[in-house]
Every structure is written in structure tokens, then in C-alpha cells.
Amino acid sequence: MSLEIIVIMLVAACLHASWNVVIKGGSNPFYETGLNVLGGGMGVVFILPFLPLPDAGIWPFLLCSMCCHAVYYLCMAAAYRQSEMTYAYTLMRGTTPLFTAVGMAAWVSIFPLPAGSASSASAPECLFWRARTCAMARSTSGAPRPPWALPW
């Protein structure tokens, strides 16, 4: 992989982490999420005049992507309002590869390689143990348990 690609990926990772911190750090996660989306939209407005319009066949996929992102942002804001960032962020990042693998297999009949299958298969187990650990830590500290915590 070229150095340019690595730098772009690191910058994207820093942006993702920083806006998650901004959303969690604000007093109203839904408002902070809206500001982040608005800021991203404002940045795109300056780039769009220099790009060609996508083909008509792409528009349904763009619309679907926009809807998926809207649901993701609403879920992210709700998760940050209800729980700590370390728990919510771990769940959001941990389930994405699993959902992607299942979706690709179900809708496009593209299946991951064996290593990818093993990784996707281990995601629910990792999330289960993370939720169990969170529930145990909260029950011993006397803090209220999150609504998604397992009962044991």
C-alpha cells in the first residue's frame, strides 16, 4: 500500500474518532450529530461543482446509502445519550464488519474468504463478552446497568 493511501486512511480514522468524541462530549448528542452532518454537507458543496454527476443507475444506491447513514447517525446519537462512549463505540465498530459480511452474502452472494469468515463469526462472541463484562462491572460498582446489558 502506498504512503499516500496510508495517510488518507489515518486522517479518515482521526476524523471518525474526533467527531465521535464531539458527539459524546456535547450536551445533546442529536444536536451534535446534526452539526457534524451539516458540516460534512457544507464541505461537499464546495467539491460538487468540480465533479461530474453520477449515472442515473447509481441514484438508488446513493439514496439507500443516505438512508443507512441517517439511521446510523440516529442510532449513534441515541447510544451516546444512553451509555458511555467506550461501550457504544465498541459495539458500533464491532458490528459493522459482521453486518457487512452477512449483507453481502445475503444480497449479492459474495462470501468472505475463510479468514474473513472466522473474523465475522467471532464478532458476536466478542460483543457478547464485552456486554457481559460491562454488566458485571456496573453491577459490582453500584452504577445503573444499561438497558442492553445482559442479566448475569
Image (spheres, grey):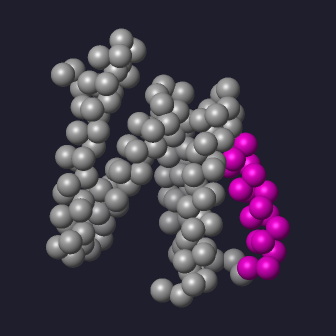
Asked if 146 appears above or below 58 in the picture, the reply is above
Is residue 147 visible to us here? no
Residue 127 lies, in percent from the top left, at 27, 43
Is residue 101 visible to us here? yes
Asked if 132 appears above or below 97 in the picture, the reply is above
Quarter of the image holding residue 50?
A: bottom right
Which residue sits furthest bottom?
A: 2
The residue at the point 60 percent across, 75 percent down is 7
Asked if 118 appears above or below 85 in the picture, the reply is below
Q: In this view of the protein, which residue sits in the foreground, 51 or 32? A: 32
Q: Is residue 50 magenta?
A: yes
Q: Which residues are magenta?
A: 35-51
The residue at the point 66 percent across, 28 percent down is 28
The residue at the point 49 percent across, 52 percent down is 68
Quarter of the image holding residue 142?
A: top left
Residue 2 lies, in percent from the top left, at 54, 87
Describe residue 114's horizontal placement relative to residue 62 as left or right: left
The residue at the point 56 percent across, 61 percent down is 13
Total labels drawn: 0
Q: Main secondary structure of the magenta part?
A: helix
Which residue sits furthest top?
A: 142
Residue 144 lies, in percent from the top left, at 39, 14
Residue 152 lies, in percent from the top left, at 18, 22
Quarter of the image holding residue 48?
A: bottom right
Q: Is residue 12 magenta?
A: no
